[in-house]
Image: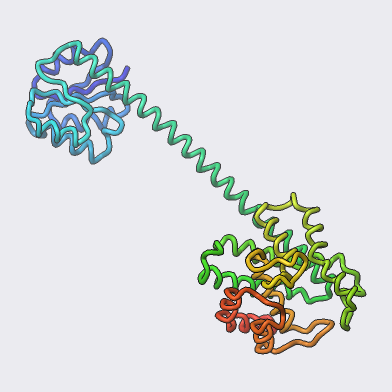
Amino acid sequence: MKKVLIVDDKEMNRDMLTDILEEDYGTLEAENGRQALEMIEKHFNELAVILLDLEMPEMGGLEVLEVLQEKGWMKKIPVLIISGEQSLQVEKQCFKLGISDFIRKPFDDTLVRRRVHNVAELFVYKNSLEEKVEEQTQTLKKQYQILKFQAAKLQKSNTNIIDILGNVVESRNLESGEHVKRVKGYTEILAKEMMKEYPEYGLTDKKIDIIVSASALHDIGKIAIPDNILLKPGKLTVDEYEYMKSHTTRGCEILNNIKDVWDEEYEEACYEICRHHHERYDGRGYPDKLKGDEIPISAQLVSIADVYDALVNERVYKSAYSKDQAFSMIVNGECGLFSPKLLECFRNCKKQFEDLTDSQKNN
């Protein structure tokens, strides 16, 4: 049976309230505030309601309320003031300190029982509801941690798949394997500058991470290009060049065949970059002759990164250009037309591109 603590310096009032409530509750009594606080601490989990007088020796009711509020006890146990006090100011002060209601003296049996019962039931429901909310909150937190862990595993899986496929392309192309790493580095530098200078493209740190990772697959379609074309040391014929250009669409066919193995955002970025990294801003690129910002920003970023790396490194069909030559060729349109905004960011990043080039060659 839950208990009611009756705090009043007059024994007659305590006896009267005990008689009214003893049928429904066990009762505890305290004749001043200090005793009351001791009993609350001792019987905290047994108490349904505290009935508290205001005028008492040693420690009055208002002082008790201040302690109860400070300790947060009234969040779990309701307090009813038993008083003949009629002052509106005192009443406001009591409610401000967190009481649930007043019971006026002289006591009416029915009113006392009903008010004690109502406030006790209300707090039982409230506390039960809070416990359920807390349980659900803890469950949701655990589920969130599980989802967070699974998302991290999925992201790692996405990155691993992309890196493996990128390395396959590099070995097929007789490259050292560093081309993918360099393109990722250039792409990240350029993307971060674009995010800073042109927020309208909606780039975020997360999107940049996905684009950088996906850039490794820009040439995946070269797996399907025959050696006599892919590795030809001299200039390609018109037919050979047309076949080489098909590495963009052939790469997309490969990606479509494995589309269910990774996250949708990675899948989309890989497809955009693979298909469109040879498009040009004036529509003279391939395979779809997209113009301007019809070209996905992911592909635009990788296109400059890929061209720059191709220029400053030796290939089977050409010698390496100097960093200054490569920079001039890109900004002057000798490698096709790029977005003016992208070129502005490329100019801003010239030193970073050169530093990355030097660091990769020194490793």
- For the residue pair 4 and 348, the one nearer the viewer reads as 348
- Above or below, 56 against 296 in this view is above
Q: Closest to the observer: 274 or 216?
A: 274
Q: Residue at x 34, y 24 (%)?
A: 124
Q: Is residue 53 above or below residue 328?
A: above
Q: Is residue 363 visible?
A: no
Front residue of 48/189: it is 189
Residue at 65 percent of width and 75 percent of height: 338
Residue 22 position in % (x across, y down): 23, 12
Q: Quadrant of residue 273?
A: bottom right
Seen from this angle, which residue lies furthest right? 228
Q: Position of residue 239 (x, y in %)?
A: 90, 73
Count every numbered label the image shows and give the total.
Answer: 0
Q: Residue at x 27, y 22 (%)?
A: 119
149 vs 8, left or right, is: right
Q: Is residue 131 left or right of residue 82?
A: right
Above or below: residue 253 compared with residue 30: below
| Nearer-the-camera pick, 199 or 124 | 199
